[in-house]
Image (cartoon, grey):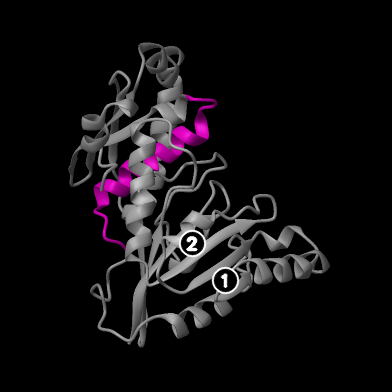
Amino acid sequence: MKAGYITIVGRPNVGKSTLMNALTGSLVAIVTPKPQTTRHRILGIVSGDDYQFVFVDTPGIFKPRNELDRAMEKQIELSLNDADLLYYMIDIEQRDIEERILDMVNAPRFLLINKIDRIDRKELLPWIDEYSKKYNFDEIIPISALKGTNLDDLVETTKRYLPDTEPLFPPDYLSDRPERFFVAELIREKIFLFYGEEIPYSTTVEVEEMKDSYIRANIYVEKESQKGIIIGKKGEKLKKVATAARKSIEAFLGRKVYLEVWVKVRKNWRRNPSDVRRFGYYG
């Protein structure tokens, strides 16, 4: 059997999580238009008769500014160390490649050029030629994660590069994360969709209780002023977030739930190592 860890890296918003969801055929990673939505190292597992792909979605590559950022960078490093194959993703707008990332991987490396549905093929060919001469990639594959373009070719090519080994997970596993994790992520996704500027980046979500059809979750912010923004006038904003999150959670779990959401202040939690660890960002 062909099996292995396939680490997906690239700058924020190049489409890593969209690709992960497309390849796994399920919502494993939340996706929003805002950069740096992904904070965790998330596994998406696809099992076939003769293969098992363990895709590893990672936070976008960027310069750390606080303890949360450093934890996210650590997740990237761990994922690179474990990789049996690297997908380095760029898109038509973010074309830069960080060679330090390539140097950290002792495994075959694919360059995936995403969002090719937005450009003419004539523009693409010189671009591929340039990267093939400048960098030592084993494969350069143009794709559209959103449209599904060339994903079948990507899967077949991936099989050839993975080692022959026993399955890494039971065949019915879709991820290594528990349901609580995905519930928290779906709530956080709605925060990214409903609020602007710095608010989504200052929040984290913790599921305090999850029993049968009842879920109680806390949204943590860094300042009292942010708490007011999250709640909104007469609680209307929070109600919209909770309603949208509940619908997504019900679709994910396949059952009706009662979702209770509270907003709490954890002052400057992104700068505090113990808080960052408590919220699970160090894995």
* Quadrant hosting residue 280: top left
Looking at the image, which residue is at 41% across and 17% down?
A: 226
User: Considering only vertical position in the picture, is 120 above or below 275?
Assistant: below
Q: Nearer the viewer, residue 12 or 37?
A: 12
User: Considering only vertical position in the picture, is 244 above or below 155?
Assistant: above
The residue wearing badge 2 is 102
Asked whether the beta carbons under mark 2 and mark 1 sit within 8 Å of each other, the answer is yes
Q: Amino acid at mark 1?
A: Asn
Q: Nearer the viewer, residue 137 or 229?
A: 137
The residue wearing badge 1 is 136
Q: Residue 186 location, x and y as percent?
A: 39, 43
Image quadrant for the N terminus? bottom left
| 2 or 1: tag closer to the N-terminus | 2
* Quadrant hosting residue 107: bottom left
Q: Secondary structure at mark 1?
A: loop
Categorize mark 2 by other alpha carbons within 10 Å: few (<14), some (14-19), many (20+): some
Q: Residue 7 location, x and y as percent?
A: 41, 63
Q: Secondary structure at mark 2?
A: helix
Q: Amino acid at mark 2?
A: Leu
Q: Is residue 38 magenta?
A: no
What is the magenta range?
175-198
